[in-house]
Image (cartoon, rainbow, N blue to C red):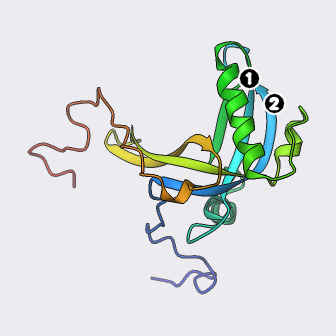
Amino acid sequence: MKKPANWDSVEAITGNYKKLPAGGYVCNITNAECVLSKTGKEMLKVAVDIATGEYKDFFLEQYLSDKSRTNEPKWRCYYYQLTEGEALGRFKGMIQNIEASNPGYKWDWNEKSLVNKVFGGVFREEEYINRKGGISTSTKLIAIRPVEGIEEIEPPAKKQINNAPDNAGSFGEEIPF
């Protein structure tokens, strides 16, 4: 076998990665924009990262790692909040929690003013069907709360798939290799 020319400089992909545990984290907003939902309703799309502690810059590190391997890296943590109709109360609560977490900040109906603001993020582990048909898990931001006391909250229960295929995660009697 011939040694590839860039062997010494290429980043090894070992399959190991750091997983964000469920729980509460102090987060910061890296981007915010007003977009339309699939049904045409206005909503706020907020890009989020972890602001402090052991997992600080967790999503930025994933993005930079992706960027080193692909021309189309993706940010992996967004929070979507509808801003009208029945969701108006949740939107107002979200804004008030961000205001409470950023002394002196007052919402001015400019979504870009949210960039670099902090809040308390509640993250939950969720199951999903992966590309191979098995069950995998990821950790998702499910709520925006005030920063105060967020790191002491009890992690929410895992969201499990109710109607997983009977063979998800199982190969039965046959070994797949």
Q: Pick out the residue farthest to the left.
A: 173
Location of residue 127 (image quadrant): top left
Q: At 25% from the left edge and 44% from the top edge, which residue is drawn?
A: 169
Please identify the quarter of the rendering in which residue 51 is found. bottom right
- Say which amino acid is labelled 1: Thr
Say which of 7 and 45 sits in front: 45
* Mark carried by residue 34: 2
Q: Where is mark 1, residue-wise?
A: 83
**Element assignment for label 1:** loop
Which structural element holds mark 2? strand
Q: Tell me if 177 is positioned left or right of 151 in this view.
A: left
Would you identify the image quadrant in which residue 171 lies? top left
**At which x and y percent is residue 142?**
54, 39
Q: Distance between the residues labelled 2 and 1?
A: 9 Å
Q: State which tag comes first along the sequence, 2 or 1.
A: 2
Residue 108 in sight from this viewpoint = yes
**Are the residues at dot 2 and dot 1 in contact (C-beta closer than 8 Å)?**
yes
Say if 1 sits above or below 62 in the image.
below
Asked whether, in this view, residue 44 is left or right of residue 154, the answer is right
Which numbered disc, 2 or 1, marks the residue closer to the eye? 1
